Amino acid sequence: MTPALLGNLGVSLTLAFSLLGLGLALLAYLQGDGRFLKGAKSLVLPAFLAASAAFLALEWALLTHDFSLAYVARNHSTKDPLWVTLVTPWAALEGSILLWGLLQTLYTFLAVRKPLDPWRASLVLAVLFGIQVFFFGVMATIASPFETLPDPPPDGVGPNPLLQNHWMMAVHPVLMYLGFVGLSVPYAYAVAAMAVRRYQTWVEETRWWALIAWGFLTAGKVAGMWWSYEVLGWGGYWAWDPVENASFIPWLLATAFLHTAVVQQTRGAFKAWNFAFVTLAFAATVLGTFLTRSGVIQSVHAFAEGPVGPAFLGFFLLSTALGLGLLSRVSREVRDAAVFRPLSREGALLLGAFFFAGWALVVLLGTFYPLLVEAFAGAKVSVGAPFFNQISAPIGAGILFLMGVGPILPWRRPRAEVFRNLYLLLAVLAGGTLLGLLLGYTLGASLAVGLFLYNLAAILLLVREGVLGRKAAGLSPWGFLQNRRRVGSLVVHLGVALMGLGIAFSQTYRLESEKTLYQGQTWEVGGVRMTFQGVRALDEGRRFAVEALLRTDRFGEVRPRLHFYPQMNSPLPAPKVIYTPGNDYYFLLMDFDREKGEWASLRLIVTPLVFWMWVAGGLMALGTLYILWPAARAEEARGVSPA
Amino acid sequence: MRWVVLLMAFLLPALAQEAPPPDLPPEVFRIARELRCPVCQGESAAESNSGVAVEMRRIIAEMLQEGKTEAEIKAFFVERYGEWILYEPPGRALPLGSGSCPWPGFCFWPWASLPTSVRGAPCPLSFWRRQSAA
């Protein structure tokens, strides 16, 4: 038994089980026969086990330095530390697809363990098996992680050094994939609900899955932002790079769905919106993979150059056509008959959905625009951070505004006492903005202060209302904490408000400066005084490091570094970041005197409130966890009961 | 140590140093952030550490010292590389108004809520759908 054999066996078996499962599930749907459904369900676990075997085979090959595998030869070296070796499966394309496929079988397995509505079960399974067929089909044919080399090299080059520079690389991709793949379950539920024409109950079950996926996506994105901040050495966390945009779009659509789903749950409205959001969120994950893995976005001439490009494009078109085709078929039946008032919870939620969908559309357009212009007009244009920032600021402000007022508004119609709260909140918003302006901040930053205080006030009002309501009913006020969804969503909203404040300030007030210092020379910039004391070289085996010794007045000794990897032409800066609640101080060594070590070129980036963005990310993840944790059992119980 | 010697032998000619890099005040980065690094994938001239970007930052710093304005500096790079070098090509970027596309709805909201608060006719949710069917 070799890793290649085990791996190929695992991939082929998963493909076979998935094909068989797809066939049985479709038969179960068409014949309405429970025995076929039982057969399909029994294939879920074997598929998961076979996929796990394939994944373990890749780990095995990496750990035993089996360079006869092309993937290992290209992405691994004997000098890699253990943790780098363990995370190498997702350092390149084929391994990432294998991880994606493995997580897909895991989600299918978990989805079947939850009680499924008998009408939809067969189609849910058919869709999930179908997705598995696609991924393992790709692995079995055009992007095999277990392709062998005729004469294996004695050692490889190792993964991209950017990926070895921070432990976050072990976490971020897995979280992102857990989020992306998690969106397949809502998609399967939506397709099944539209096909069997049962439009109401699917949304409750789906919301739970969508929240899991959303939690992972959020945590994954924040982890990725942190990685970018700590590793890429430019002092930023978000560059509006196509890869980032591609993962932002599904997040936006999933967020929209989480909000419109509540309306369907409580008022039975927005059915069509929910189907559309779920379909598009899943399709956007596939489109994102196509965009970023096929090479299409760098140049039109390399259109679908990579082997997986056309496959992913086809899969995207198929899954979108399936979802939207079914939606158009049932569009008459999911039409909303309810009347709604704009100044109500559902009014705010609908408007919020507009904002999220609009934002997703604009990001998509901005990402594709250079491609379209080059294809049709032959001109090269650049759409980058300035454009995206400019359009995202008003949309983000609108969302922050709705986030405060939405939960305050009651369903259906506003009551008189609500207006008192509304005026209070608007006063806080105006007062906060004015305060910001008086403190000398820019209009945008002042508005961010106002919006943050306004959201804080809205959250406090809701907590107060919940606690007072309980007291009036003679209940313990702590019971409010048992309203998991309310409390959890308030924690998430607090995180979002804090994130908004952090983004506004870090984007507006960023100081960046560079200077060449000679030994003993002192530089005072951004409120820090530093003295350059010399450079020091370190041999670390797989890489070579040079660090500058800086004595600072506020943070003691600071040592930014440059890392030289044998497989890279230019050195990678390893910044030294000092986090403080006010400003982050980001020290970078840009260059140094290679002959005598007499001078070093240093860059200092001072960015305010970045620290709070990581806190905000933590709050968002914790809030999601709080909603999901015991709700799991309650939701399951609800699913079993015939209601 | 053999490793280090090899590395240094490899690096020294590649990165032959004449003089230490120039000092770059904050304005340089502000301008560079709006210029594309011509050899990178979606990085601005402020972020990239490629040779071209380093050179661009040096030129910006020099031109600033000579008293050139931001517009003149940008024009200089446009002349060399074309409008593509600008992250926001004048008149060619997506209409910036597209950022406000959800805003008509936003303006509509308080207006539409007005009759409700004085007990007017509620607006049907399927309003937009009927419009599109017509």
Image (tube, helix red, strand yellow):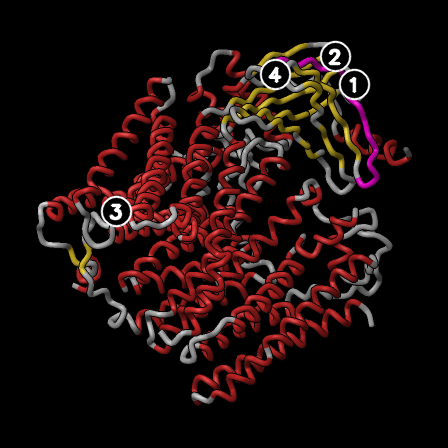
Residue that numbered label 2 is attached to: A519
Q: Amino acid at mark 1?
A: Gly
Q: Position of residue A328 (x, y in %)?
A: 31, 70
Residue that numbered label 3 is attached to: A409
Same chain for the residues at labels 1 and 4, yes or no?
no
Residue that numbered label 4 is attached to: B23
Give the mark nearer the N terminus: 1 vs 2: 2
Q: Amino acid at mark 4?
A: Asp
Q: What is the distance, in whole Å, between disc 4 and disc 2 at their CAs? A: 16 Å
Q: Chain of mark 2?
A: A
Q: Chain of mark 4?
A: B
**A260, B10: nearer the viewer:** A260
Q: Which of label 3 and label 4 is nearer to you?
A: 3
Residue that numbered label 1 is attached to: A597
Magenta span of residues: A529-542
Q: Which of label 1 and label 3 is nearer to you?
A: 3
